[in-house]
Image (cartoon, grey):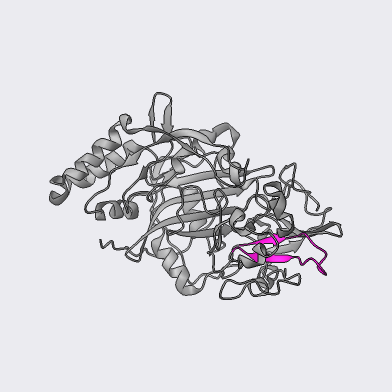
Amino acid sequence: MRLNLCALALVAACAGQLPGGDDDAGDASGRDGGAAVDADGPAPIDPVVHVDLDAPRPVALLPAERLAMVAAALPRVSDPWLKAVLESPDTMFYDAQSIVPGYQDSFGDNVVAPIGMRPNTIDPRLIDTAVPGGHAQLFAQRGRFHFPFGRGIGGRADNLLVDFWAPPRADGHLVPVVWWRRDPNRLTHRYEWMFPVGTVLGEVLFEVADGAWYPYEIRVRVRELGQWRVDVYRPFPTAADLADAVERKRDTSPAWQAAADVTALIAAARDPGTLAPATLGGSHYAGAFAAIAGARDVLPGLADPSLLGELLRETPFRSARGAAWKRRGPLVAYAATTAASFHIVPNDYDGGFLEVSEASCARCHADAGRPFRDYYANVLAYGELWGMDEVFTWHPFATAAFVDAAGDVVDFNYDNRQLRGDLVTAGLLAPFTPSTHTAPRYGRLPSAWRDFAY
């Protein structure tokens, strides 16, 4: 199978804030079908995302060549706010090489019991020597925690994810993430941090086929005072959307008009009878992810999936908040899945179990930074889940101080947590001052476990 990417034009724009509040949660991100609305009525927008590769960013987290690849692969977007965020020169794209996934080990005295930052790719022997089998309790494989903490719900380990971070501004200046070190006793030494209100964090999920990137979903979170507000953007929020798009493609191509599998895909998308009861649950981290009784809608594949690749490239992504992919009586799926090797979602995609809502995302994100001991009492001495402030993919620590190019931990026997100088210099990272960093700009998220001590 050969699927080709189209390049995108590249210019700059400005970021904004996620539209909608509690009163309009069902339409939080302007599901306007590709038009921005003004006083004179609908005004069409260019759905192509234009990223100015020459614009200076607060910190260049991605190398220039990598940023160019990401910019060329971004999907079209119908929502003016999201388009502005992606195009803003304040928005910094990053991946697992530019902010290396890792977790803190805050248990110890840094004399006999070492503390510090640990890459997710830590050598299993460093855990198993003291806790036989401990690594297998925490990790599905080296570098990836067990479900639900190892990857985004619905994502696959063999596909690609690129993150983005847009800090807010106040009086023209970037508003920083604030950090503090908490030392409640001789065995607890933990760095913590908090994002300011207005921070936008997101991720673009890609399928990879024949070396080409095909976006299938954008997930966005905006920091509010007491929560992260969320949205998910897809090319086809509902099965009817997919059926209509495939039908239009089929009717304009003689080759696809004669393809029985294309007609079968349209029929399957329009048929509520394809929904089947299913359950999604975790096998590790007991209590972290209660089983969900839902439904799966398995889309049939195509012998020539280039039609699907074209749709993913050409269709403007729009909000799926408040949308159900398909319903039949009590059964509902919020996205499709497939057994095909390439489709509008990855093989065995499980995003259909979760509606787009704050509660859905909090099922996992609320546990970012939680001690392993809460799940496995025998793993007391090996720290906490990755992340903080309900965000997994971001941390403030200098890469070279805690992990080498092979993914092995650096200075395991010493506290290797060093703050990134580039973030400090750019004004993106500052020490927390209780009298200054207060509401309405900053607020700690509520949780019963966050002030833990060993």
Would residue 39 be visible to someone looking at this image? no
In the rendered image, which quarter contains the N terminus? bottom left
Percent coordinates x, y for residue 436 in the rendering? 81, 54
Q: Is residue 99 above or below residue 280?
A: below
Q: Which one is nearer the viewer's eye here, 81 or 1? A: 1
Percent coordinates x, y for residue 143 in the rendering? 55, 62
In the image, 303: left or right of 59? Answer: left
Residue at 69%, 44% in the rendered image? 225
Q: Is residue 105 magenta?
A: yes
In the image, 322: left or right of 339? Answer: right
Residue at 34%, 37% in the rendered image? 239
Residue at 55%, 54% in the rendered image? 150
Q: Residue furthest right?
A: 185
Q: Which one is nearer the viewer's eye here, 352 or 443? A: 352
Residue bounds of the magenta highlight: 102-120
Residue at 61%, 53% in the rendered image? 137
Percent coordinates x, y for residue 378 in the rendering? 71, 52
Q: Residue furthest front?
A: 132
Percent coordinates x, y for residue 284 in the rendering? 58, 47
Quarter of the rendering containing residue 100: bottom right
Would residue 251 be visible to someone looking at this image? yes
Q: Is residue 422 magenta?
A: no
Q: Which one is nearer the viewer's eye here, 222 or 154? A: 154
Quarter of the rendering containing residue 363: top right
In the image, 235: left or right of 57? Answer: left
